[in-house]
Amino acid sequence: MGEKELDASYAQDEKIGAIGTEIAGEGRRDSLVDAARRQSVALNIVENPLKSASKEQVVYDAEAFARDNGMPEHAEMFGRAALVARDPEKFDQVTELKEDERSALAYEHTHKWHGPAMLWYSIGLCAIGAATQGWDQTGSNGANLSFPQEFGLDSTDDNPNPRGEWIVGIINAIIFLTAGLIGAFIVDPLNHYLGRRGEIFLTAACLTATPIGSGFAKSWQGLFAARFIMGIGIGAKNATVPIFSAEMAPHRIRGALVMFWQLWVVAGIFLGFCANVIVKDTGDISWRLQLGSAFIPSFILMVGIYFCPESPRWLMKHGHLAKGYRSMNRLRAHPIIAARDYYYSYIIYKEELKETRGSGYFQRM
C-alpha cells in the first residue's frame, strides 16, 4: 500500500472513530437524563407540570376540572388558582385575581404560620395521637414493679423465677412486636376502606379499650391479650396520623408540622411518667391505674377526630373531588388558597399515577 493510500486509510479511521465517540457521547447523555429522571421519581420530585403549559391551556384545564367534578360555581376561581399554582412566587403578576384573593395570597406569603382554626385543631389532634404512643409505652414502666407479684411472676435472688421473667418480658415487648408485625400491615386496607378519619377513630377506640382492659386484667394471660391488641392499634395509628397531618398541612410548613410527631411522642412519654408518679402510692391497684391511665389521650383522639375534615388527598384518590375541595377549604384561610393547593395536588397526583402505572403493590410500597 502506497503512502497516499495509508494517509487516506488513517483519515477514514479517525473519521469513524469521531463518529463513534459522538454516538457514545449522545448515548451517555441520554442515559444520564434517564438516570436523573429515575432519581427524581425515586425521590418523589415531580416538576410542576403547569409550567410547561400555556396560560390559556392552564385556565381551560382548571375550569374544565371544576365543571366536570361537580364544582361549576367555582370554575372561574379554579382558573385563577391554577395560574397562581403555575408559579406561586409570582402570584402578584396574575392580573386576573380579585382584590380579596390577592390580599389573602399576600398575607399568606408573609405569614407562613397563618391558618384557620380548623387547621390548627386538626394538627393539634394529630399531636395528641403522637402523645398517645408515648403514654402507651410508659404505663408498663411503673406497673412492672408490682404486677409480677400480682400474678406470681416475681423473681428474687432467693427465689429465682426464670419463667416468670420471660413472661414479664414478653408482656412488655408484645406491643412493639404486634405493632410492626400486624399493625403496620393492616394500615393500607384500613385506610382504603375507612379513610384517614375512620382508621384513626378505630385505632383510637382500640387504644382506649385496651389500657382499660389491662387495668382490669385478672391473669397474666388477660394482660398479655390486652397488650397484644394494643400493639396492633399502635402500629396502625402510628402509620396513619403523620400521613393525615401531612395531607392537611400547607406545603410551606408541612415539614415542620410532621417533624413535631416525635416531639409529641416524647411529650406523651413525659405525661405517662407523670401519671405513674401520681398513682404510685395507691397500694395494690397502683399498677392497674398506671396501665389504665393511658386511655386518656386516646379517648380525646377518638372523640376529637369526629370533628376533623377528611383528608382532601384521600377524597381525591377515591373520586370524591368536590368533597375533597370542601375539605381543603375548611383547612385554608381563603377559597383561592384552597383551590390553588387542591388543584395543584390533583395535578401532581395524576403525574404520580403515570409513574406508578403497572407497578405492583409491593413495588409501590
Image (cartoon, grey):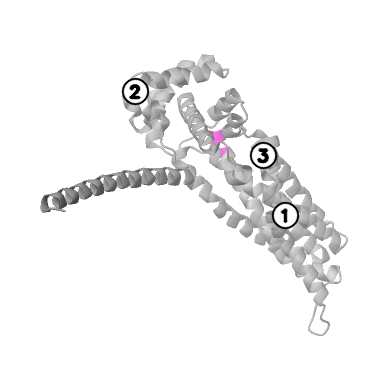
* Front tag of 3 and 1: 3
Q: Hey, which residue is sitting farthest right in the picture?
A: 218
Q: What stretch is highlighted in magenta?
A: 116-121
Q: Residue at x 51, y 34 (%)?
A: 354
- What crowding class fits label 1: few (fewer than 14 Cα within 10 Å), some (14-19), or many (20 or more)? many
Q: Which of marks 1 and 2 is nearer the N terminus?
A: 2
Number of the label disc, if any, that sits on residue 231: 1
Residue 163 vertical position relative to residue 95 in the rendered view, above or below = below
Label 1: element kind: helix
Distance between the alpha carbons at the discs numbered 1 and 2? 52 Å
Please, which residue is most extreme toward the top here? 73
Q: Distance between the residues labelled 3 and 2?
A: 38 Å
Residue name at image x 33 percent, y 45 percent = 29
Callout 3 secondary element:
helix
The mark found on residue 191 in the picture is 3
Residue 141 x/y as whole percent: 70, 65
- The residue indicated by pointer 2 is 94
